[in-house]
Amino acid sequence: MPVKIDYKGCIGCKKCYDLCPLDVFSWDEVIGMPVVAYDEECWHCGICWMECPKRAIDITYPASNW
Amino acid sequence: MNLNKAADKILETDVLVVGGGMAGCPAAVKAREDGLKVTLIEKANTARSGSAGVGMDHYPVGLMDYMSPREFLANWDNIKRETDLVTDWADPTRCYRLYTHQLWSINELERIGVPMRWNDGELRPTPGHGTGTPLLRVHWLNVKPTLATAMRNRKVEVLERTMVIDLLTKNGAVVGATAINTRTGEFIVIKAKAIIIATGSLGRCYSPSTPTPWKYKFLYHYCPASMSGDGWAAAFRAGVEMVNMDYTDIGILISDELSISFGNLVMNEGILPKIFSWDGQELPIKGMPRPLEYAELEKAGRDPIYYSIEHLPDDFQKRVEVCMADERPVSLKMAQDRGFNPRSHRYVNMTNRPFLFRTPAGINTDGYFKSTVTGLYAIGDATNGGHSCVNAACGGLLVGNDIVDFVKKAEDTEIDKAQVEAQKEIALAPLYVKDGTEPMELECAIRYICDRYVGLFRSEGKLREGMRRLGTLKRVFIPKLMAKNPHYLMRCLEVRNILDMAEVHIEACMERKETRGDCLRLDYPVKAPSLDGKLQFQKFENGKLVSCMRKLTPLNIEIGG
């Protein structure tokens, strides 16, 4: 998966959910945290990673790009 | 008019801006400052959408002295080299206006809160792209949040996560648009006196450069994956004329992360990288090889071609890092994750295959960014020659200024309910299809056709087969598209747009029976002198795709004195 959320670090600020240009995240009202709902649509722009105030999102490149 | 049953939400505005990127936001701000009611719809979130959503490190302004129109014409070649204008391929009056308003645009952006100055409080021009293009280095990591705030402060009505479906017309003029909220599925009708298309170009009818398990457009620079030609397709279906739709650019690989964007390239700091073939021989090429040059290198067994910055001064690594911090900081993380050291590693630069539509392609507009449909404007990469943040922002500001006169004179018209209902039926159909086709399956099929039957090296037989196959896809698979929620409905609407534009693309390639620039026809390998100075136009008329070749309107030297 290109995007991983560290749920221990996540504070539920919604930035990733609000800002992702491809709308990869959905919002889980029960836990009050984001969910990677459409991971296959991520294009690795890194906006979630750079906007996350807790750096609770990691982003990795696919093997074919190494 | 009773639209209440047809629409979940009905809005009325003076100006509708479609797309909130580097062109759309300045246009909305300017039109609002001029006292108009402005609504902007954006498929993502204006704070981080479009090409500059990940930040931007350069504003490729010409920074040349003012010239009269006559001097401008006399210096055509020089200006082409030293600015980002594409004067051969776009309305010369519009190019002239963009050129003479570049410095004005710096002041205007600064006035609305966009930082234009370097750490020392001065403008920081650099020699630029390596081809002599001067540009302004800027710290623009947060340019989009800044523009989003500027719109909010001026009470521009912004609808985020809202995608345009189609334009509404009456007697050959635009009167509004239909749109959908891609999270809630809310169907929206917006009545507008004028519409500005600012949705950029189209990048998704060709495959990404590296096979990845991920679906969307990835690994090409300056091409946000969201660019599915939504504005182009909606305008085209409304009868607008498209221009130069056979112009695609060649793929720049970002596999080694330094070349993730022109903005991050060392060229931005005015120092050229060296270009080597795999066997370590330096190539006498500036910038990057064009398709024919590249094909020769491939044929001679000298591919891949590498960029190298090993020879650069000691402080250079630091300067490249500043570029990356200003534009797409994730680049630096990726480079670090992979242990990539630009001082000791060379990086593969490009691949010889097409990707997005090039700057000469887009909606045909005149000196005032007006399209061939009354009330419909196009700015930024949505129009030909409007690409790059300077032309996008400057064009947006100019249109935001000019549009006041049009809006004040525009008559109040009614929206045709039947038109709304027809657009709604087509757009929402995938929500009711079961056991159908997922949008990505169709998108991959379109990409395959464009890769296989168009590509860079084109010929009649391949193009005809490609067109035939696209026709089959349209007939068989568009009615089968299924969407289990509004998110996938957005993808279905995108793929419909991509398919419409791919058809225009192949038609344009077939019409060009010559080789010109990077438009290569293997079966017509030389320039046709009869087509000198002519551009290619396509539009949708009475249910048919109509093409023609004609010359541009000459520079109107009344403009600007």
Image (cartoon, rainbow, N blue to C red):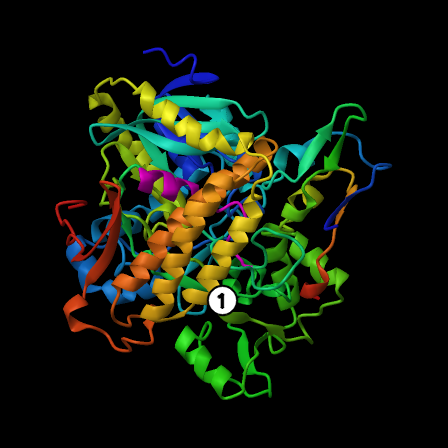
Q: Nearer the viewer, residue A35 or A13?
A: A35
Figure quadrant of residue B173: top left
Q: Residue at x 38, y 47 (%)?
A: B500
Callout 1: chain? B
> Label 1 neighbourhood size at 10 Å, few (<14), some (14-19), many (20+)?
some
Residue B233 among those drawn in magenta:
yes
Q: Please say whether residue B224 is visible from this viewpoint.
A: no
Left or right for B390, reference B54:
left
Figure quadrant of residue B219: bottom right
Task: State the image coordinates of residue B373 (x, y, percent, origin top left).
Answer: 24, 37
Task: State the image coordinates of residue B108 (x, y, percent, origin top left).
Answer: 39, 38
Residue A51 among those drawn in magenta:
no
| Vertical arrangement, residue B271 with respect to residue B538, above or below | below
Q: Please say whether residue B265 is visible from this viewpoint.
A: yes
User: The N terminus of chain B is located in which quarter?
Assistant: top left
Left or right for B12, reference B412:
right
Task: State the image coordinates of residue B24 (x, y, percent, origin top left).
Answer: 42, 37
Q: Nearer the viewer, residue B318 or B420?
A: B420
Q: Which residue was labeled with disc 1?
A: B270
Q: Nearer the viewer, residue B334 or A64?
A: A64
Left or right for B243, reference A1:
left
Q: Nearer the viewer, residue B419 or B273?
A: B419
Q: Residue furthest left?
A: B558
Q: Over which residues does the magenta segment extend?
A: B220-237
Circle 1: residue type: Gly
Q: Residue at x 53, y 36 (%)?
A: B490
Q: Secondary structure at mark 1?
A: loop
Task: State the image coordinates of residue B181 (x, y, percent, origin top left).
Answer: 53, 27
